[in-house]
Structures are given as structure tokens and as C-alpha cells.
Image (cartoon, grey):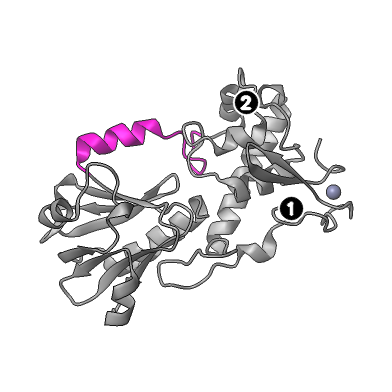
Amino acid sequence: MPELPEAETIARDLDRRVRGSIIAGIRVARPDILARGNSATTLSRKLRGHRIERVSRRGKNVIIEFDGALRLVVNLGMTGRLIASDAPRSAEMRHVAALLRLEDGRAILYDDARRFGRLDLRDAGRWSQRDAELGVEPLSDSFTGEYLFRLTRGSISPIRNFLLDQKRVAGVGNIYANESLFRAGVRPTRRARQLRRAEAIRLADAIRTVLGEAIEARGTTIDDYRDGNGDAGAFQLRLRVYDRRGEPCVQCGTPVKRVVLTNRSAFYCPQCQR
Ligand SMILES: [Zn+2]
């Protein structure tokens, strides 16, 4: 499931490849991937002739920014792929959920096997609303250990769940929450408000390090994720606890444990994480 490093990788790839391009047309084969309030007709009418000024990221979303302060907010859901194609073949085009045709003959394809992703075109006002709903960017200067310490006060959620709440910290999902908790030596089941200051500082550092390394590795491909060029990432080879139930801890050899917290697996070393 694409998280911050995957969305960041896609955004950088697309920015490099399609910045400055003009939209010639839009085709939506699967209207269920459009967010409420959007339709294929309005998307085409509002975007045709507009120039892509930049492709950026906020949380787990890829943001295609157009002139006129329009933004196409792409939430990749579970299996969403956003790929720039130099020569879209007709066969390929038949299977994509949506396609943005560019004036130079290229295209941006949105493909989503399970279709939990959403495309949402927003003007400046509706974008600031959405932006304000999302929490702090963990790679920004505002996200310090002290900030995380204060943010966790008063929350009785297990720290793993706390980190997944996009209203608090934007972009961290299950893979990177588990990996960061392992590196910080904090057990995923601990209540957020019980973290000590020193642990919050270690955890904030670990989050930044893990996300940075994952961006460098171009994301984690376990099943579906592909970058903006259609290629797999490499961070799955560097996971230390995620999806490693029963395998020896990389630090101490103790078998990695799995617990289920609110229907989603958490992985930890019972020896290294307290
Ligand atoms: Zn261990």
C-alpha cells in the first residue's frame, strides 16, 4: 500500500517527466475512482488546455498542480499506480482506470486493480480545506521529537495506530510505522501517551531516517506498487520487522512477533522493543 516514500517517488518521477505539459483530454474508464463531486465530463472540461506546473506530494497523496490553481489530488488507495507513458499503446489504454492525454502524444495513466484510490480535482479553496485536515509532514522541520512528544500526550491509542492517523502525522502507513518503531525500540502496542520524552525523540528520528532511506530506495514493492516509470521499488529488501513474523530479529535473533491491532498486523521484536 503506497505510503509517503512511494507517493514521493511517483511525484518526483512525474514532475521530471511531465512538468510543463498541456492536457489534451481525459478519459475515465472506471468512474468509481473519481471522488464525490467529480465526473469525467467536469474533469475534461476543467483540465483540457491546462498546463501541469508541478507534481508534488502531501501525505500519501500525489498532487498534480495545474495553472489556475487547480490540483488533481491522487490518493493511491491500496493498489493505485500513476505512470507517465511516452508511447501509450491502445491495449494498455483499455485497461487503465483513467488516462490524462498530453498534447505531445504522451499520457499519464492511472491504474488501480482494487480501485480503492481516488482522483479529486480541487480549486484553491477546496484544496486548503483538504490540506488543513492533514497532519504534520514528518520530513518537515516542524516534526521534531519534542513535537511528537507533545502530540502523543492525551492519546490512549497504541502508538502504531497513532502513527497511522493521517490527521496527526501525514504519510506514515503500516510498513513505515512498524519499521520506525523497531528502530526506536518501542513496542507497537504501547499507548501513545505513555511514551517517554527520550522515546518520542528516538521515534521521530527513526521515522525521518526510515522514510529517507525508503525514498532513496524508491519505495517498497510487496505486491502492486510501481514508481512513476512503471518500475518496482527496492526497500522491501531492507525491511527489518514488517512482514517478518517468526523470522530472527536482525539485531538479537529472537523470532519476530505479530499482533493484530484494529484489524491490521503489527510486527515487533519482543526483546528489542519495550
Ligand atoms: Zn531483537
Disc 2 C-beta below 8 A from ligand 1: no
Taking the spot 59% from the left edge, 29% from the top edge, the residue there is 148
Taking the spot 29% from the left edge, 51% from the top edge, the residue there is 34
Magenta stretch: includes residue 136:
yes
* Residue placed most toward the observer, 246 or 193: 246
Label 1 vs 2, first from the N-terminus: 2
* Residue placed most toward the observer, 219 or 140: 219
Q: Which amino acid does label 1 sit on?
A: Val
Instruction: Please give left or right for residue 2 compared with residue 241 in the image.
Output: left
Q: What element carries label 1?
A: loop
Reply above or below: 125 against 46: above
Taking the spot 33% from the left edge, 77% from the top edge, the residue there is 92
Where residue 263 sits, quadrant-wise, is top right
- In the picture of the structure, the residue carrying the numbered disc 2 is 149
State the CA–CA distance, disc 1 to disc 2: 24 Å
- Give the residues drawn in magenta, as a range: 122-142
Give residue 89's position: percent from left, percent from top. 29, 82
Instruction: Please give left or right for residue 210 compared with residue 137 in the image.
Output: right
| Residue contact between numbered discs 1 and 2, judged by CB atoms under 8 Å | no
Magenta stretch: includes residue 50:
no
Reply above or below: 37 against 29: above
- In the picture of the structure, the residue carrying the numbered disc 1 is 241
Reply above or below: 255 against 187: below
Q: What residue type is labelled 2?
A: Phe
Give residue 274's position: percent from left, percent from top. 81, 35
Give residue 59's position: percent from left, percent from top. 44, 44
